[in-house]
Amino acid sequence: MDDKKIAVLIDAENVSGKYIKLILDEVSNYGSATYKRLYGDFQTPSVRAWMKNLRDYAITPVFQYNYTQGKNASDSALIIDAMDILYQDKTDGFCIVTSDSDFTRLVNRLREEGMFVIGMGKSDASKTFIAACNEYKFLDKIVDEEEKENTKNKNHKENAHDHKGDSVTPIGEIKSAINEL
């Protein structure tokens, strides 16, 4: 089976950098990330927090200064790049990482051209944007599930610890023995 080429376009003003490993791991389930671009105004603290990830994950930053307060110029840059990539005919699909409903029309247009589109973002994303994507991954829910699983596994390991050779009887066994008496 051919490895699908996926363009990963991230709205840094809308998604936290703490999800980058999860994003790229999820994309690897579908193919290879051939484009990895991060869009935002790197003067803002939330976007600046992505800087380490750029280096660690070989992501190309696309700096877009917000010329007007309240307008998101980086959204436009992401949309323009997505259309350029689409017409270069070098990818099999897109991963649009945002929770912003402004990208719904972009996703619809990519799908009209036969592209497979994965959306990724928070669980509070617009229902319309989620419906426009072939698949949508809720990053915050995946992280929550992984943390619960890790806690469950940790607790299981602690409870299953072999006490042979220990000189201390676990308090649970002592309480059980007392209650039985």
Image (cartoon, rainbow, N blue to C red):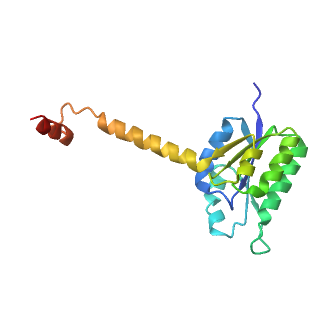
Q: Is residue 129 visible?
A: yes
x, y percentage for residue 2?
A: 77, 27
Number of numbered discs: 0
x, y percentage for residue 101?
A: 75, 56
Relative to 63, does residue 124 appear above or below in the rendering? above
Question: Which residue is nearer to you in this view: 79 or 109?
Answer: 109
* Residue 14 placement: quadrant: bottom right
For the N terminus, the quadrant is top right
Question: Which residue is nearer to you in this view: 177 or 73?
Answer: 177
Relative to 21, does residue 38 appear above or below in the rendering? below
| Residue sitting at the far left | 181
Residue shown at 86% from the left, 47% from the top: 109
Question: Which residue is nearer to you in this view: 176 or 158?
Answer: 176
Relative to 108, does residue 12 appear above or below in the rendering? below
For the C terminus, the quadrant is top left
* Residue 87 placement: quadrant: top right
Residue shown at 15% from the left, 39% from the top: 174
x, y percentage for residue 120?
A: 68, 48
Horizontal arrangement in the rendering, residue 69 relative to residue 51 (left or right): right
x, y percentage for residue 88?
A: 89, 44
Horizontal arrangement in the rendering, residue 15 relative to residue 145 (left or right): right
Residue shown at 69% from the left, 44% from the top: 136
| Residue sitting at the far top | 1
Q: Is residue 168 visible?
A: no
